[in-house]
Amino acid sequence: MAELSSTLLYIAFIIYLIATLVFAMSLSDKKGKENKAAYTRRWGRVGYVLSILGFISQLGYFVTRWMASGHAPVSNLFEFTTFFGMMMVFAFILLYGIYKTNALGVFAMPIALLVIAYASMFPKDIAPLIPALQSDWLKIHVTTAALGEGILSISFVAGLIFLIRVVDQTSSTKKTKMLEIIMYLLLCVFGFIVVSAISAAAGYETSFNFTDKKEQKVELTYNVPALVGPPNGTQADDHFGPLVASPSWMNGEQAPRKFNTFIWSLLTGGVLYGIVRLILRKRIAAAIQPKLMNLKPELVDEISYRSVAIGFPVFTLGALIFAMIWAQEAWTRFWGWDPKEVWALITFLFYAAYLHFRLSRGWHGEKSAWLCVIGFVIIMFNLIAVNLVISGLHSYA
Amino acid sequence: MKTIKCECGHSNPFGTEICESCGKPLTNENSRELINMRYEGSAVRSQTYNKTIVDKIWNFFSSVKVGIWIIIVILIAAAIGTIFPQEMYIPPNVDPTTYYKEEYGTPGQIFYLLGFHNLYGSWWFLLLLAALGISLIIVSIDRGFPLYRALKYQRVTRHESFMKRQRLFAVSDTGISMDRVKRVLAKKHYRIKEDNGNILAEKNRFSRWGPYVNHAGLIIFLIGAMLRFFPGMYTDQTLWIREGETVAVPGTKTEDGQYYLKNHKFIMELYGKKDKEYSAALDKTGNPVPKNYQSNVTLYHAGPSDVVGAKPELKKERDARIKVNEPLSFNDFSLYQVDFKLNEFHRMNLKLENKKTGKSYGEIKVNLFNPKSTYDLGNGYKVEMVEYFPNFKLDENDQPTTENSVPDNPAFVFKMFTPETTKGETAFIGIRKNVEAADNKYKMSFSGIETKNVSALTVKKDNTLPIIIIGGIIFMLGVVQGLYWNHRRIWIQQRNGQLWIAAHTNKNWFGLKREMQNISEESGLVMPIDQSDEKSA
C-alpha cells in the first residue's frame, strides 16, 4: 500500500509537469495560422483536464497513504507540505473553473510542483503519532488550514502575474528588482531540490558531534557538503569541512543542518538565475511579460482578490478556529501564544488588513498585488522558518 | 436635525451624498464621473461632523485607515514577540533578567528590556487590542446604520444621473419583451420590484451586512477573552497525584461541596515491534516514541461538611481514563493529562544488621511520605527515626537539610537499639552516603525500594468559552456572508422611448459582467458597457 501510494504521488508529479508545459504552450503566439483564441482555449482545456487528472492521482496517494499509516497523512513536514501542494492545485482547479485564465496555470502549477518537490526532501517514512497528535482534530485542523493556505497562495500567483504584466520593464527600477528577487527565490527552491537530489544520488554524508542548547550531545548528519557547521561542533569525518559555524540562536531541531541546506539553496538559486539571465539576456519578468499582454490586468486583479475572499474564511476556520478547539482539548488552553499560533494570527491579520485596504480605491491593482506577494511570504515563513528558527510546540511539523 | 430634501421628495439626513430614495447625486451634481457608490453615498457620521472633541475621537476610530494601522501594529508587535521565546516558555527555574542575555546575547537583552519577553500580556499590547475593539465598534455603527437606511429607502426608479453615472450602463431602443427579461432575471435569483414599468432587480443584499456581523462576532470574542480576568470565570491549576492517592481536586470547591480524585494507575506506552507500519521510522530515530499517556482515575464528590476537619464522605461519580487529547470533564471543570513522573520513591526497606556477622535482625519498611518515629522489631530490637530528609542536600553551612518534601533523595538519621547496645547507636543513612561512629556494632542497610508513578493533571475551568464560541461562530458566519456572496443590482428604466440599463455590484465585477452577458443573450437586453474601461482605455 505504501508503495502504491508513492507511485501515485510520482504519477501526479509527472502529470502536473505536463500540465504546466501545456499551459505554457497555450500562451505561445507562434501559431500564426490558427485562430488565436480557439488555440488558447483548446490547449487551456487540455491543461485543465491534466491538472484534474494529476489531482485525482495525488488524491489516490493521499488515500492509500492514509490506509497504510492508519492516520491522516498530514502529521510531519513531508506529509503536510505535500498536502499543501495538493491544496494549491485544488485551489487552482477551483479558480480556473471560474475565470478560465491559462496564465494562472502557467504559474500556479510549477509553484505547486516546487512545493511538492520541496516536500519530498523531508523524511518520507510513515511515522507513528505521539499522544498529542492522536485526535480527530489533526485531520480536520491541518487539512482545512492547508486548504486555506492553498487558496491564499493562488492570490499570490495571480498577484505575481499581475505584476509581471504591468510593471514597466523598459528601465530598471525598484519594482523590477523586487520582481527579479521573487523569480530568484523561486529558483532557490528549485536549487534546493537540485542540490538535495544530486547529493542523495551520490550518497554524500558528513556528520558532526556537538553539544546543543539543552546540554545534550547530538550527532548531526548532513546530506550536502557542510558550508556551515554547528556551533562548537567537531566533524566526525574528513569530508569538506565547514567554513563557518551557524549562529547559536538558531535552536530549532537540527537547525545547523537546515541552515546549511538553506545557504546551499541560495547559492544554487543564484547560479540558476545567472544561467537563465545569460540565456534570456534580459530580466526574467521582462522575458515573460510579452506572453501576458493579452491578459486584462483588471481580471487578474479580481482573481487575486477573489482568491483571498474565498481563502480567508477557510484559513480562519482551519488555522485559527479549529486550531483553538484542538488546542483547548490537547493543551488545556485554546490560545497560548506559541510561535506557530502567533504566525497563524499574523497571517489572519495581514489578510484582514488586505481586505480593508481593498475598500480604498487606490489600493486595487498593483499595490494589492504586492500585498499578495507579502502574504505568501508570511505563509511560507510560517511553514518553513518557524520550524527552522523558532522552537515551539509545533516542532513536529 | 437638519435634513436635505431631494427633488423627489425624500428627506435625507444631513451629509447624504446620494439621495437614499431616487439616487440623485446631492454633491457634485453636474459631474459626469462615475458615482462613488461606497456605503451608497449615505450620511456617514464621520464624514459629516468634525467639530467637537467627540467628533474627532469618533472620526479617528471610524477611519478604516486607522483600523488598518492598528491591525498592522498588532501584527508587527506579535511577530517581534516570536523572535525569542516568551517568558512562559523558558525553563521555569531560570531568572529571566539574565536568561535572555546569556542565551541570546545583546539582541536577547534588548528583547527583554523592551518587555517583549512578556509581550502578549503587556499593558500596551492589551491597549492595542482594546483600540482594535473600539475601532470595530465605532466603524460598524458609523457605516452600518446609514447603509441600512440607504438600502431600505432605495426606490425602483432612480434619478437620471444616478443611472448614467453607474459603472455598467447602456441605452437601447425599447421593443423587447419585459416579461422575458423578468423571467430571465428571476431565473438568476434576482428579486424584482416594479414601478411604472421600471425594474429594480436585486440579489444578495444580505451580503452587505457581512462585515457588520463579523465585526460583532469579533467584539463578542474580545469581550469573552476579557471576562477571564473576572473572578470565578477561570481556573487553571496543576495537580500532582500519586498512584493510590485520593486528593481533593484544587479549585473545585463550591457551595455544593468538593470533588476528589483517586489515581489508580499511570500508564505510559511506547511504540514497539508490534507497530510494524512504523518500523522504518522507529529504527531511524532510535529514541523511544511515546504512544500513550494515561491516568486511570475515579472521580468522587463530597457534600459540604459542617464540621471543620471532619473526614469528607466521598460519593463515587465515575471511573475514567484521562489521556492526552481526552480530558475528563465534569460540571464546569476539565482534568487534562499534562505531565508525569515515573518511579518515584514511595517506600524504602532497610535491615538492621550486625556489622561483624552480617546477621539481620529484621526489616523496617519506611513510608517515605509518612514515616513512623519508631520501628519495633521485637526481642529488644528497635529502630528510632531521629531525623528524616526527603530530598537531602547540604546547606551553605554544610548542615543536612531537605530541598522539599518530595522523596527524590531520602536520607535518615536512625538510632538503633539492641539488647547489646541498649543506649542506642546513631547512624546517618542516605543514598550512597552513610555516616556513622566507627565503633558502632550495628548498621542499617538498604534492602529494597518500592516506587510509584505520579500523574500531573491540569484542572481547568473556563466559563468564558461559551461566549468565545458564540463570538467565533458569528464571526465566521459574517465573513462567509460578506465574502462568498455579492450584492448585485440591475436597474431597467423606460425613458423618452429609450430603455436605460445600469448595473452595480459591491465586488467581483467580472462575475457581474458575465452574468449580464448571460442575461442579455437570453433576454435580448442590451449588454451594458463598462464605463471605467472606456476611461482607462
Image (cartoon, coloured by chain):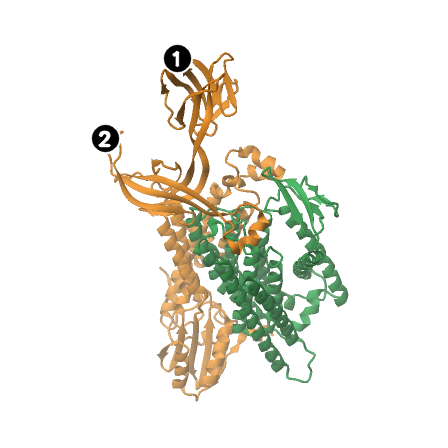
Chain colours: A green, B orange
For the N terminus of chain B, give its image quadrant.
Answer: bottom left
- Residue A234 percent location from the top left of the image: 70, 41
The count of marks equals: 2
Left or right for A11, reference B496: right
Comes first in the chain, label 1 or label 2: 2
- Residue closest to the eye, A154 or A124: A124
Above or below, B247 against B155 in this view is above
Q: Pointer 2 indicates a residue of which chain?
A: B
- Tell me the quarter of the picture where residue B195 sits: bottom left
Residue A188's disc is: none
Q: Give the x, y percent position of residue B279.
A: 55, 53
Q: Nearer the viewer, residue B176 or A289?
A: A289
Q: Secondary structure at mark 1?
A: loop
Q: Which residue is farthest bottom?
A: B175
Residue depicted at 59% across the width and 60% down the height: A373
In terms of depth relative to the viewer, which is nearer, A192 or A364?
A: A192
Q: Position of residue B458 (x, y in %)?
A: 40, 41
- Residue B5 visible in the current orientation: no
Secondary-structure class at tag 2: loop
Q: Nearer the viewer, residue B108 or B149?
A: B108
Where, by quadrant of the figure, is residue B473 drawn?
Answer: bottom left
Q: CA distance from mark 1 to mark 2?
A: 47 Å
The chain identifier of the residue carrying mark 1 reads B
* Mark 2 neighbour class, 10 Å CA radius: few under 14, some 14 to 19, many 20 or more: few
Amino acid tagged 1: Pro
Graded by Cα atoms within 10 Å as few (under 14), some (14 to 19) or many (20 or more), the crowding at tag 1 reads few
Q: Which residue is mark 2?
A: B307
Quickly name the residue at label 1.
B419
Residue type, label 2: Val
Q: Residues at badges 1 and 2 in contact (C-beta under 8 Å)?
A: no
